[in-house]
């Protein structure tokens, strides 16, 4: 911080760095959030139920209640636990609400379809609550942001491989010169008593590490999307990889996928049974690994030859 007449204030450069750091973190967290909200497809709901809204609320609150509202019909709203638990660890009463309109309604929940007033959709298996789920994505976003900012600093260091040491009275002059230099500008200086011997260029010897950081970034990104159940292959080699190698690499992501897919499929079964509907939820086929698809297709083509 710099001392001013009004107290202490952050250096402008530090403020800009903090803004960039925060923006980079927000960018990666938003990417992971949107990926989480778009990994499942819902079909068969009446028009007043927005499937995208269900996924957004599941991400934000971890729990959505599906119930009949007399003036609207079937609705799906975020819910929070508002009573005790049954022997299966499920809430016996929840409060459904709208975070935009102020609507709120208490609902009784029971494993008995004839007695329950709602069907609950959980974002994950109940052992992994919403706070932990979002916190894990936040941890990945923070690590990704730190790596990306490290790359930025390393790249910038290649543009400024030297530090200039000058007499104290010429500091501001050379600061302006370096500002132009770092922005790819040209500056011509001229003043009396120019003493070039008093100006020293000190090499910073900044090593080029961006490529190594980028490899770590890719592995971390694959780990993050694997946590969301999105197929990924982190095996890096020149020759074509086999189906078995792809399947082994995808094992973790498939296991994590089930953490979110099974609660949704169970909820769909109960919704269909209670309300006589034909809803279904599927994992987005667009997110299956392309390498696996290409290997499978190539194998099928070879069999047909």
Image (cartoon, grey):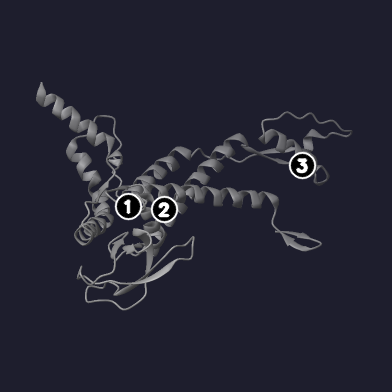
* Front-lying residue, 252 or 304: 304
Is residue 145 visible to us here? yes
Residue at the far bottom: name it: 84
The residue identified by callout 2 is 140
Give the CA separation, mark 1 to mark 2.
10 Å
Q: Which residue is mark 3?
A: 166
Mark nearest the camera among 3 and 2 is 2
Q: Earlier in the sequence, mark 1 or mark 3?
A: 3
- Secondary structure, mark 2, is helix
Residue visible at 27% across and 62% down?
125
Q: Is residue 183 left or right of residue 28?
A: right
Residue toward you, 140 or 127: 127
Q: Quadrant of residue 199?
A: top right
Residues at marks 1 and 2 touching, judged by CB atoms closer than 8 Å: yes
Residue 132 to residue 229: above or below: below
Which quadrant: the C terminus? top left
The secondary element bearing badge 3 is classed as loop
Provide the secondary structure element on which disc 1 rests: helix
Mark yes or no: residue 233 visible. Answer: no
Q: Mark 2 or mark 3, which is nearer the start of the sequence? A: 2
Q: Name the residue tied to disc 1.
A: 227
Q: Is residue 240 above or below residue 14?
A: above
Q: Position of residue 163 (x, y in %)?
A: 67, 41
Residue 247 place in picture, x, y as percent: 20, 42
């Amino acid at each position: 911080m710099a001392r001013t007449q009004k107290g202490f204030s952050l250096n402008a450069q530090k403020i800009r760095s903090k803004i960039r750091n925060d923006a980079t973190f927000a960018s990666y967290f938003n990417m992971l959030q949107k990926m989480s909200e778009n990994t499942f497809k819902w079909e068969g709901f009446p028009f007043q139920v927005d499937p995208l809204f269900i996924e957004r609320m599941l991400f934000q609150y971890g729990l959505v209640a599906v119930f009949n509202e007399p003036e609207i019909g079937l609705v799906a709203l975020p819910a929070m636990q508002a009573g005790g638990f049954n022997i299966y660890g499920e809430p016996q009463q929840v409060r459904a609400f709208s975070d935009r309109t102020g609507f709120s309604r208490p609902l009784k929940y029971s494993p008995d379809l004839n007695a329950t007033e709602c069907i609950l959709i959980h974002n994950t298996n109940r052992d992994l609550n919403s706070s932990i789920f979002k916190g894990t994505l936040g941890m990945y976003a923070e690590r990704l942001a730190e790596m990306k900012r490290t790359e930025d600093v390393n790249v910038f260091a290649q543009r400024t491989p030297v530090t200039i040491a000058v007499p104290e009275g010429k500091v501001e002059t050379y600061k302006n010169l370096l500002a132009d230099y770092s922005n790819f500008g040209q500056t011509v200086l001229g003043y009396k008593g120019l003493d070039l011997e008093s100006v020293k260029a000190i090499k910073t010897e900044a090593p080029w590490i961006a490529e190594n950081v980028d490899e770590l970034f890719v592995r971390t990104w694959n780990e993050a999307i694997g946590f969301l159940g999105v197929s990924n292959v982190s095996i890096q080699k020149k020759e074509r990889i086999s189906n078995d190698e792809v399947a082994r690499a995808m094992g973790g992501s498939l296991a994590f996928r089930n953490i979110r897919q099974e609660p949704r499929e169970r909820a769909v079964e109960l919704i269909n049974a209670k309300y006589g509907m034909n809803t279904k939820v599927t994992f987005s086929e667009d997110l299956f690994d392309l390498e696996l698809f290409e290997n499978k297709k190539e194998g099928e083509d070879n069999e047909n030859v």
